[in-house]
Image (tube, rainbow, N blue to C red):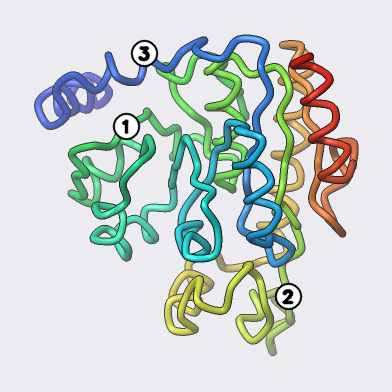
Amino acid sequence: ECMTRAKTCRKQRLPGNRQRLSSLKDTHVGESCFVIGNGPSLVAEDLTKLAQANIFSLGSKRINVIFPETVWRPDIWAASDLDYIEMYKDEIQDLKGFTKMLPCQAVLDRDVLVRDAVYFPFIQSERTPCWFNNDITKGVHFWGTVTCKLINIAVYMGFKNIFLLGVDHSWPIFHNEEGVGCWDTSKKAHFSDEYMTKEQECVISQHIGNMEKTVQYISQAYHDVGWFCRQSGVNIYNATPGTCLTEFPCITLDEALGMIKQQKD
């Protein structure tokens, strides 16, 4: 009954959304793309290389902070953290020039309606067991990180080779008096100091709770996503320099660009 009410609400608030979401399916069958993370290793020069090579890219959240430094722009942009979406709703409204994707809960739970966004069903409450839906109209799992959701979107669009960049998977952690691992907001976690104010970092870190368990959850999510992708014949490579994520084969950006050029030729 709750699901029925949610679907009815989506149709009323987001007319035509299902058609827009469905129209993305299999639009890039067999092609290669980059999924961009917002880690500290990300630099504008590398994104400019992607733009010069005309490679399809998916980015997320405040990747727009790096826009003044590069001509690169994502083809798909997404966010899933409801606190972030509510906090930056005006900035999200102003983003232009690419497809924006948000979870339906942004409208249903936070009343954030971005008229030019495409909304996807977000499996938020049931975090276990995990399931990777090749058809995202049936729901995108929580996974703990928007990067896994971007991978899911890329698979839905038909991409066969997915390259990660800026996915450091290296969160700074300190232990409080109770011995709980907390996000150390005094250390750099993103590509820019302008990515988020310290106050905003503190608000979000309070909602995370035990950061060590969160990182473990995300690590398992990458493992599960990798397994599901391999079953679908999708290859994932990590071109992030110095990455702590070893779930996928690690290569350099130049090697990734060479592989894509060879595939095109």
Is residue 101 visible in the rendered image? The answer is: no
How far apart, in angstroms, are the residues tagged by discs 3 and 1?
A: 12 Å
Which amino acid type is shown beneath numbered disc 2? Ile
Quadrant housing the C terminus: top right
Left or right: residue 172 compared with residue 152: right
Up-down relation of residue 243 to residue 155 (above or below):
below
Category of crowding for the residue at label 3, using alpha-carbon neighbours closer than 10 angstroms: few (below 14), some (14–19), many (at least 20): few
Query: Which residue is disc 1 drawn over?
Result: 119
Image point 66% across, 35% down: which residue? 53
Point out the tag, 3 or 1, that comes first from the N-terminus. 3
Question: Considering the numbered disc 2 on the image, is that residue within a helix, a strand or a loop?
Answer: strand
> Which of labels 3 and 1 is toward the front?
3
Question: Considering the numbered disc 1 on the image, is that residue within a helix, a strand or a loop?
Answer: strand
Which amino acid type is shown beneath numbered disc 1? Tyr
Query: Which residue is disc 3 drawn over?
Result: 23
Point out the tag, 2 or 1, that comes first from the N-terminus. 1
Pointers 3 and 1 in contact (C-beta within 8 Å): no
Which amino acid type is shown beneath numbered disc 3? Ser
Q: Which mark is residue 173?
A: 2
> Which of labels 2 and 3 is toward the front?
3
Quadrant housing the N terminus: top left
Q: Would you identify the image quadrant in which residue 166 lies? A: bottom right
Category of crowding for the residue at label 2, using alpha-carbon neighbours closer than 10 angstroms: few (below 14), some (14–19), many (at least 20): some
Image point 59% across, 14% down: which residue? 158
Point out the tag, 2 or 3, that comes first from the N-terminus. 3
* Camera-side residue of 218 and 57: 57
Up-down relation of residue 29 to residue 257 (above or below):
above
